[in-house]
Image: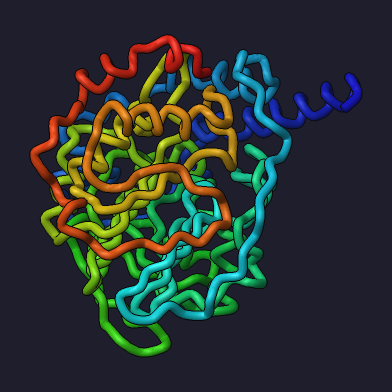
Amino acid sequence: MTPVLKTVAAALLFLVILLALAATIVPRFLDRRYYDGPVSGHYDGERFFNPGADDDTAGVPGGGSRARFLWRQATGSDSRPPWPASVAVTQSRPAARVDGDAMVATWIGHATVLVQTQGMNILTDPIWSDTAGPFGFGPKRVARPGVAFADLPPIDLVLLSHNHYDHLDLATLARLWRRDRPVIVTSLGNDAILRANGIAAQAADWGESLPVSPKAGGGPFEVTVSRNHHWGSRWFADRNRALWSSFVVRLPGGNLFFAGDTGLGDGRWPAEAAKLGPVRLALLPIGAFRFAPGQMKSGSHIGPAQAVDVFRALGASTAIPVHWGTFRLSYEAWDTPPKLLTAAMRCANPPGAFSPVAIGTPIQVPLIAADTLPDDRPQRTGDALLRCLDTPAVKALR
């Protein structure tokens, strides 16, 4: 790109940032009240909040002002490690259905995973767009989807965790709705955003459950909207007008847990999900955690070390790491999350399998076996895990 084009691109991005920041000045035009309901332990009558404390998700990651943070990102002046412009992906063509207790999971990219079991096709936070942001702006995809949209089998159930653009992608959801009319389960308020765009969804509060049946027959299976630790916004001024969540899909061969987008918060929510039954497969985020040099987490995102703690607390048999390697959202290098996850699993020594997978590669998820359930092996968690990770090799990761 020539210097002139770079200047023009930076000017356009700056204009978008100014328009977004204007939401704090003219909220009556851009604020949206997506939900009205009774006051609860996480809703004050106007906005949702995380139980305990919300301070770790309220500020700009890494400190400083929001305007400076956005400007540095837009102009590339934030000293982030470079990412590749694109990475190689071998796309696959999934089976139409996977019956019985067999389970096949295919990571499409970012937080999008296709899970097939019991004759049901489940899709999490689907995004096939090339950018993650409004009006075509935002971080660009560096890895094409692991399954072409045309090769995607009929979708029965979509789990939609919250309303950030890299998770609630209206263009993709509209395509899915026109083609398959899937059941879309989300948390309170996000259904209003979809409904305004002609897409139907079922919204529930934390702890509430909904029955879902695959179009091919069988079921119904229960989907529980469960707690995690995050925030929501489309325009800054509408911050926390809609709720964020994780999900538990209760299945005969062991449950599916999708963490959505989350920080650790009080750390109690994984155990709450585990109480709903043994977790056969957990989809856990490991990226967008490094907004400052050496940082191992952020308030809104768990990093690989905390993801291992979540994996252990869930008692999951198998986990697939997601939310990395597709859109550059923070300061870590492209391959830092999987490398750090491998080191953290080596240090933590938990039972079960939690390792990086390739985008587009179908994974046969085994049934829960006795030797993958919690045992008496010594394990490192929390601070002990971080001390184990204090090595030259880990420190060299950017």
Q: Is residue 87 above or below residue 58?
A: below
Q: Residue at image x 15%, y 39%?
A: 268
- Residue 57 in picture, x, y percent from top left: 34, 29
Residue 285 drawn at (x, y percent): 40, 41
Query: Extreme bottom residue here?
Result: 217
Horizontal side of 200 relative to 358 (left or right) equals left
Query: Which residue is situated farthest in the left direction here?
Result: 376
Where 102 sits versus 54, above or below?
A: below
Residue at 63% in and 34% down: 19
Residue at horizontal 33 percent and vertical 28 percent from the top: 344
Looking at the image, what colour scheme do you see? Answer: rainbow
Which of 153 and 42 lies nearest the eye of the viewer?
153
Examine the image and state in which quarter residue 123 appears.
bottom left
Q: Can residue 287 be seen in this view?
A: yes
Of 166 and 124, which appears nearest the observer?
A: 124
In this rendered view, identify the residue nearer to me: 341 or 232.
341
At 51% from the left and 27% from the top, the residue drawn is: 336
**Image-based side of 111 in relation to 139, left or right:** left
Q: Would residue 244 be seen by someone viewing this image from the given angle?
A: no
Q: Where is residue 320 in the image (x, y as percent from the top left)?
A: 40, 49
**Could you tell me residue 220's position as x and y percent?**
26, 82
- The answer to whether residue 143 is above or below residue 186 is above
